[in-house]
Amino acid sequence: MNSRAFHSATDLINAIRHKHISALELLESYIERIEHLNPAINAIVATNFEDARKRAAKADQALAKGETWGALHGLPMTIKDNLEVVGMPCTAGAPALKNHMPEQNADLVQSLLDQGAIIFGKTNMPRYGEDIQSYNEVYGQTNNPWDFSLTPGGSSGGAAAAVAAGLTGLEIGNDIAGSIRHPANFCGIYGHKPSFGIVPDKGMIPPPPGVFPGDQTFPSDILVSGPLARNAQDLDLALGIIVSPERPEKTAWQIHLPEPRKKRLCDYRIGLWLNDPACPVDSQVGNALQNAADALAKSGAQIVDQRPDIDFNSAMDIFFDLLNGVMGLGVPPKMFEEWICEAQNPGDTKKDPMARFKRGAIQRHRSWLMQDAQRQILRHKWADFFKDHDAVLCPATCVPAFAHDHQPFHGRTITVNGKPRPYADLMGWAGLTNMVYLPATIAPVGMTLSGLPVGIQIVGPYLEDRTPIHIAGLMADVVGGYHPPEKFV
């Protein structure tokens, strides 16, 4: 198989521009790999090779005339299946949408196309993104390219698996509770969760397609879209393309993200928050993270064992109430009314995940406003921390990739250091930064003793997305970096 499939998007674009390979040749090489290798992982679940070939041929013709469409000229790539792309179904993993064919592209998809991308496929996800694994009744289960018996994570699991396996040049996923960061971590690639509110939502499902026919959309609290790639430079490239105000807001303003805070790794002052009793990290993950931090310190980075003045437990209570308020929008009306009737006896929300979900889903607006006020206090504490620190290193999640588990979501558990822990712990380290709208980059930094990837979460200041991405890029020269799974080389 062609090793070029594992090159970064940046290198692939340069190869096309310098005519080392044509866009059509690169597309064909990915199609060949998909036909041979995708069945084992089921990452790419819908394709439109015919239109992609036509567009790639036109890209080559344009280049022959000295014309360049943009920063992604000729790059073949895929898109998560809850972002609308004309010419391919957009199901969001839901049987009710299995025949949905969009009439226009999602705004961020259009931005990618305007810069010359060749979008040839859609990647798998859980139904409406409501899981940390990636399987649904429409397309089935996606497997981790490092071990087919394990999940690639979710909800952007198909996206991460496709990037890791060398089946696509670049990907875009979404993240509300780690849905970019978990898959990037489990599959050994890079991922970036942007600051909240800087990437347009128009054309993302949910909400259901067609609800907002005009320029308006329904921005969901906490939820963001961002890139997954094989190096940090690609994250920066893609982010620069998809960052934009929503359509109605373009009348009045633009978004210009600041450059990274520092130039060299040794100039950065970076805090550590590698474990917490409220959400303990498995030792096989913790050891890899500590080794990475030690290597960075030896290389000259200013690594300090300091963290924001935040109680993890309290922060998680706020996060889950805010998250469940969002997720409750998808509860059918009849069930919602039943939950309201049950509210007199909600159960122990600390021990019963379903009781906690119900409480958040049916909360009064006054309750949500109180939680939002607490969020703003936490945002202030993070901002204070970033006055003296440029970033903080955290776990991406508490465990490496785990076995497929299709039991009801709220009945699952995970194993941390040999002991059962609540399944919600998987969202803990992601939720810590999600609800306060901070950017966070995942960078691969090592492997467990059993040969599974471990990524580290680099959290940066609000709207300073390029700082954690830059740190991730500098780290690759010291520790980790992307390596293809052996089964796909």
Image (cartoon, rainbow, N blue to C red):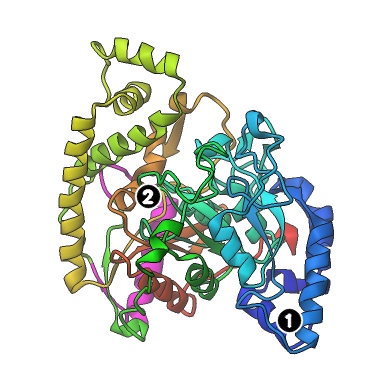
Of the residues shown, which amino acid type is indicated by label 2? Ala
Q: Which residues are magenta?
A: 276-304
Q: Residue at x 33, y 21 (%)?
A: 355
Q: Which residue is mark 1?
A: 16
In the rendering, at what x and y percent does residue 35 appear?
Answer: 84, 54
Indicate which disc residue 68 carries.
none
For residue 349: magenta? no
Q: Looking at numbered disc 1 in the image, what kind of residue is underneath it?
A: Ile
Q: In 3D space, how far apart are the residues under numbered discs 2 and 1 (Cα atoms)?
A: 37 Å
Residue drawn at 38 percent across, 70 percent down:
254
Residue 281 drawn in magenta: yes
Q: Is residue 21 above or below residue 205?
A: below
Provide residue 327's location: percent of width, then percent of height. Answer: 41, 33
Q: Residues within 10 Å of mark 1 (few under 14, many from 20)?
A: many
Q: Are marks 2 and 1 in contact (CB under 8 Å)?
A: no
The quadrant in which the N terminus is found is bottom right
- Write down the residue under mark 2: 430
